[in-house]
Amino acid sequence: MNRFIKNLIIPVVALLVLLTGCSQGKIGNNSGDPTPIESEKTDILIVYYSLSGNTEKVAKQIQKNTGGDLFKIEIENPYPDDMYEISDLAKKEKESGNLPKLKDDLPKLASYETIYIGGPVWSNTLSSPIIKYLEKDFNGKTIIPFWTDAGDAGKYEEEFRKYLKSGDLKQGLGFSNVSSLGEEEIDKMIKGLNSISESSSNLSETKIRITADDTVVEAVLNDTKAAQEFKKLLPLTLSMTRMGEHEYYSSLGEPLSEDDITKVGYDIGDLAYWTPGDLFAIYFDDTDEEPEGLIILGNITSYISLIEKLGNLQEMKIELKED
Ligand SMILES: Cc1cc2nc3c(=O)[nH]c(=O)nc-3n(C[C@H](O)[C@H](O)[C@H](O)COP(=O)(O)O)c2cc1C
């Protein structure tokens, strides 16, 4: 029995919520929607598998934000209703390699460049239909994974990398307890995810950890010269000032390289170096202002709301994250 299943025995209420949402085909399958749901001509595809609608909720928001085509993966033989049965079945499917047969109306990938692939976390790893889907050839495609869980995603992202046979894998994003997240919150997290992929970060980039009191947030540094210089300063404890409900900033004490291209404005989740003031900044929300002279050092990969919820003056410890 995995850690998650054991934990579920205690929060009975959470279990009931999960179980009521676990019947196959409850959402989407009966909608009669043509699949994929195509919007304007786009090179973005959002493919997802969803048993109880959580991943579907996120997928639909990604579709809204990106204008991509949306496609729901379905399997030939539906899973039973009971979560424990599914869990046992999925384990056997993985061990035997006898993965579920997907309905063969899957979208052709030729016209797509970026493919978001979403699914639920099952027993700390990928659901069997997603493992099956990853057998496809994604050569030349940019792949962005996303997943939903009930609080313990295990090593979903690492597992995803293991199963993906081809394609350029970008940083993905997990969404916990989606039913308790509002549209706005999901939207904000997706914007963070997009900014991560736009800055073409990938899993081999430098992972860092930012700790403020009991809150731990993860981030990645990119390979700009300034980010590499910043990396050399770690571990670092900074007294961060919260400004205008959109950023934390602090002086770094010493300037970083200004050889990299600077930009005007930021995306939510950016870690940046503000060159006019030699300041390090973490941006957690939008603002009407468009700061000039920013060098983007990296991105937050955890929930941005963790940062947003912190108080006024925050001492933050920034260090390399050892795997
Ligand atoms: C078979 C099974 C195994 C699960 N295992 C985990 C788990 O290991 N960790 C976790 O946090 N949630 C787990 N869950 C909960 C789901 O990941 C979570 O409810 C998810 O958001 C469901 O997405 P969906 O509605 O798109 O299917 C499991 C659910 C099922 C059905």
Image: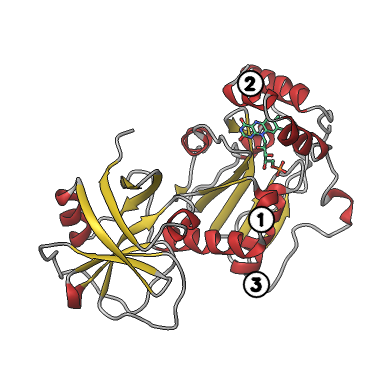
Give the residue displayed 34% in from the left and 51% down from the top: 220
Residue 111 showing in the rendered view: no
Which residue is the site of mark 1?
Answer: 59
Structural distance between the alpha carbons of marks 3 and 1: 18 Å
Mark 2 lies on a secondary structure that is helix
Q: Nearer the viewer, mark 3 or mark 1?
A: 1
Q: Quadrant of residue 292?
A: bottom left
Query: Mark 3 Cα within 10 Å, few/some/many (few <14, many 20+)?
Result: few
Mark 3 lies on a secondary structure that is loop
Give the residue displayed 42% in from the left and 70% down from the top: 246
Which residue is the site of mark 2?
Answer: 6
Q: Can you give x and y, in whole percent of width and height, for residue 162 in the image?
A: 48, 32
Disc 3 marks a residue whose amino acid type is: Lys
Q: Is residue 200 left or right of residue 156?
A: left
Ligand 1: image quarter: top right
Q: Earlier in the sequence, mark 2 or mark 1?
A: 2
Structural distance between the alpha carbons of marks 3 and 2: 46 Å
Q: Are marks 3 and 1 in contact (CB under 8 Å)?
A: no
